């Protein structure tokens, strides 16, 4: 790794051109072999607590055994607890002259600003797909592993600019493919769908064909990485949008989409971006993917215009929400949950938006109860969409609170205008009330 190279350069006794480690001296060879006493590696993901950090810091005062510097490499440093960071802070402010700290992380924004301000930052750029592909080709050829170019490209793209990740993914793929990498097998191992699947999915979304979208999703359900499918769809949308402006020869799977309205592509891309964050919340990834794609179908700019026109023509199907809440035939639990929801109705699509905490406890039985009550009331089949984009001011609960407040306000106004009530209140004068042991009152 880069940290080991830097460590060798710092402790090498025979530098080449005053910068490059010789890889021959005792210090360089011991680091290469993982046996360097003065090069201490710590995995912050497993040793993140304050006690681990204190034990580490106790060794700082000791001089290096045979090297110029004692070097501490803390990998995934962002995983340390705030207490551990605070314990490190003093040593970073006034480090002993023989000690050097190296911090490695993939998420530097999670590190405390007080720590970052005391470090020299070296930001690494992502490596291009071509460079990773070429590097893997050299390694595979040297190791006598059979492969085709498309397999290497798939691994390079999955690595997302990291050589280390590319090598880790390669080890996994090689073991499954028996040292003979073919594109189809690599796709199966990595859970990467065929380009045709992504193209068909986008076509179904643009055609507003919900049935086909759900059918494609069911077939894709065997793969684990549902976030990757959404990202692949967004990559295709991005490629189409760029090709529309560049006016150059496009890939085969893009040509069919070049006449798509650019505004619609931008809308779909932004919708995908806004829903990617939900995958990190720990909720069921397949459900997130499904709901995102249904949003793309239900709330595209064109469908909104069409549905708004159709709703105007079909006044009998308009939903006066939350006015109809009391008319729905619901059991107690479902009714309590639904009163916290806002609703958007578009033709035969009904979007029910709940607060996050309510949506998380809404089960299938309650959903069926709610869906049946709406369909029985409207006497039509509906497509139901659930999300947490609730407008709290358009819920039955909010309407009831406002109504109760209005009733109380009207009662107070009426009482103040009542002559008899004012005379009674004006004649009352209570100075004090005391309770004695015999429960008698004195005034």
Image (tube, rainbow, N blue to C red):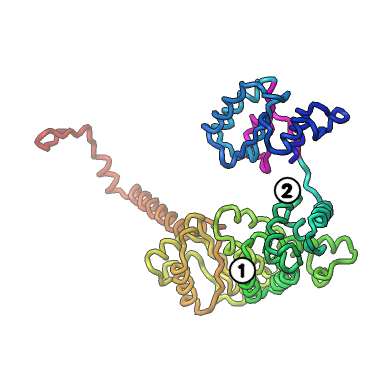
Which residue is rendered at x = 72% and y = 34% of the image? 30
Q: Name the residue under label 2.
A: 164
Taking 429 as reference, is 260 above or below it?
Answer: below
Residue 159, percent across and down? 73, 53
Residue 121 lies left or right of residue 368; in this view the side is: right
Image quarter (top left, top right, bottom left or bottom right) of the C terminus: top left
Q: Where is residue 38 in the image (x, y as percent from the top left)?
A: 67, 29
Q: Distance between the residues labelled 1 and 2?
A: 27 Å
Crowd band around label 2 with a 10 angstrom C-alpha radius: few (<14), some (14–19), many (20+): few
Q: Residue furthest left?
A: 438
Q: Quadrant of residue 93?
A: top right
Q: Nearer the viewer, residue 324 or 50?
A: 50
- Inspect this view and state whether residue 167 appears: yes
Instruction: Give the secondary structure at mark 2.
Output: helix
Disc 1 target residue: 222
Q: Which element type, helix, strand or loop, lies under badge 1?
A: loop
Residue 395's spot in the image, x, y percent?
49, 59
Residue 295: horizontal and vertical position, in percent?
Answer: 63, 65
Quarter of the picture holding the N terminus:
top right
- Which residue appears farthest toward the right when viewing the image? 248
Front residue (pair 438, 133): 133
Residues drawn in magenta: 98-123
- Above or below: residue 133 compared with residue 380: above
Q: How crowded is mark 1: few (under 14 residues within 10 Å), some or many (20 or more)?
A: few
Give the left or right position of residue 223, taking residue 438 as reference.
Answer: right
Above or below residue 106? Residue 117 is above
């Amino acid at each position: 790794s880069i940290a080991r190279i830097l460590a060798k350069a710092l402790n090498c006794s025979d530098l080449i051109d005053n910068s490059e480690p010789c890889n021959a001296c005792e210090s360089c060879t011991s680091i290469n072999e993982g046996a360097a006493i003065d090069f201490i590696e710590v995995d912050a993901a497993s040793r993140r607590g304050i006690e681990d950090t204190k034990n580490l810091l106790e060794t700082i005062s000791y001089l290096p055994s045979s090297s110029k510097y004692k070097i501490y490499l803390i990998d995934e440093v962002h995983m340390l607890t705030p207490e551990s960071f605070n314990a490190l802070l003093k040593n970073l402010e006034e480090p002993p002259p023989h000690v050097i700290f190296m911090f490695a992380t993939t998420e530097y924004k999670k590190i405390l600003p007080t720590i970052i301000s005391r470090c020299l930052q070296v930001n690494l750029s992502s490596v291009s797909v071509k460079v990773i592909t070429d590097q893997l080709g050299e390694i595979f050829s040297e190791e006598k592993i059979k492969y085709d170019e498309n397999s290497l490209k798939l691994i390079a793209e999955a690595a997302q600019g990291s050589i280390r990740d590319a090598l880790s993914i390669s080890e996994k793929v090689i073991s499954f493919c028996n040292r003979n990498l073919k594109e189809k097998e690599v796709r199966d191992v990595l859970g990467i769908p065929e380009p045709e699947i992504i193209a068909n999915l986008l076509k179904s979304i643009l055609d507003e064909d919900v049935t086909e979208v759900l059918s494609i999703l069911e077939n894709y359900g065997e793969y684990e990485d549902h976030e990757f499918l959404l990202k692949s769809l967004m990559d295709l949308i991005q490629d189409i949008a760029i090709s529309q402006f560049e006016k150059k020869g496009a890939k085969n799977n893009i040509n069919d989409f070049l006449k798509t309205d650019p505004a619609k592509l931008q809308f779909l891309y932004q919708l995908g971006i806004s829903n990617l964050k939900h995958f990190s919340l720990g909720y069921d990834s397949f459900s997130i993917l499904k709901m995102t794609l249904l949003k793309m179908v239900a709330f595209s700019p064109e469908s909104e215009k069409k549905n708004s026109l159709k709703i105007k023509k079909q006044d009998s199907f308009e939903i006066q929400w939350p006015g109809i809440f009391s008319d729905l035939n619901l059991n107690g639990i479902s009714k309590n949950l639904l009163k916290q929801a806002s609703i958007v109705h578009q033709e035969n699509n009904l979007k029910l938006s709940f607060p996050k905490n309510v949506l998380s406890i809404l089960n299938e039985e309650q959903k069926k109860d709610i869906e049946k009550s709406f369909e029985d009331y409207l006497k039509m089949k509906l497509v139901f969409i659930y999300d947490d984009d609730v407008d709290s001011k358009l819920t039955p609960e909010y309407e009831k609170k406002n109504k109760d407040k209005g009733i109380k306000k009207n009662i107070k106004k009426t009482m103040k205008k009542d002559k008899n009530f004012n005379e009674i209140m004006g004649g009352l004068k209570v100075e004090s009330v005391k309770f004695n042991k015999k429960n008698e009152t004195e005034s």
